[in-house]
């Protein structure tokens, strides 16, 4: 039994060791990337580079989140734990859209 538990722990440690963090800026009322591809377990840091607030969110079935409003110079991150397509928007600026493709 303890070998099974140890194997499971090593699996999760190995998986998190390979996770990457990507950065997407919010500048001029746009995301700095319109589309990106990441792997399951990776995270994306959304950095506000505009002199006003942004509120990044997704209602996608694969990954829904709402980061809340935050000002210039601050950032918030999301870890993507399921494969699929995630549509990301800003609740304050309706023309801000991007797509994140999460691969297995």
Image (cartoon, rainbow, N blue to C red):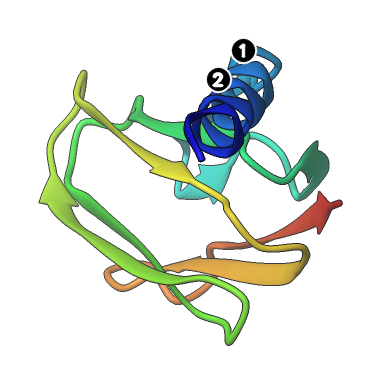
Residue at 61% across, 12% down: 17
Q: Quadrant of residue 13?
A: top right
Q: Can residue 25 be spotted in the picture?
A: no
Residue at 47% across, 31% down: 2
On residue 33, which mark appears? none
11 relative to 37, above or below: above
The residue carrying pointer 1 sits among few (fewer than 14), some (14 to 19) or many (20 or more) residues within 10 Å by Cα, namely: few
Q: Can residue 31 be spotted in the picture?
A: yes
> Quick check: 73 left or right of 37?
left
Task: Measure the alpha-carbon separation of dots 1 and 2.
Answer: 6 Å
Callouts 1 and 2 close, C-beta under 8 Å: yes
Residue at 58% across, 36% down: 8
> Quick check: 57 left or right of 101?
left
Q: Residue 69: x and y, percent?
A: 13, 54
- What is the tally of numbered marks visible in this picture? 2
93 relative to 34, above or below: below
Identify the residue at the far front of this view.
1
Q: Nearer the viewer, mark 1 or mark 2?
A: 2
Mark 2 — residue? 13
The residue carrying pointer 2 sits among few (fewer than 14), some (14 to 19) or many (20 or more) residues within 10 Å by Cα, namely: few
- Judge by depth and name the residue closer to the eye, 98 or 66: 66
Residue at 58% across, 54% down: 81
Q: Residue 89: x and y, percent?
A: 49, 68
Q: Residue 64: x and y, percent?
A: 44, 75
Q: Secondary structure at mark 2?
A: helix
Q: Secondary structure at mark 1?
A: helix
Q: Quadrant of residue 66?
A: bottom left
Q: Residue 92: x and y, percent?
A: 27, 69
Mark 1 — residue? 17
> Quick check: 103 left or right of 55?
right
């Amino acid at each position: 039994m303890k070998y099974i538990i140890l194997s499971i722990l090593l699996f999760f440690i190995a998986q998190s060791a390979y996770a990457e963090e990507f950065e997407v800026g919010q500048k001029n009322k746009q995301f700095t990337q319109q589309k990106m591809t990441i792997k399951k377990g990776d995270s994306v840091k959304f950095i506000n580079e505009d002199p006003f607030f942004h509120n990044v969110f997704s209602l996608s079935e694969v990954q829904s989140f709402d980061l809340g409003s935050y000002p210039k110079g601050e950032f918030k991150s999301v870890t993507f734990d399921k494969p699929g397509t995630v549509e990301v928007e800003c609740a304050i600026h309706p023309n801000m859209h991007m797509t994140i493709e999460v691969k297995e």
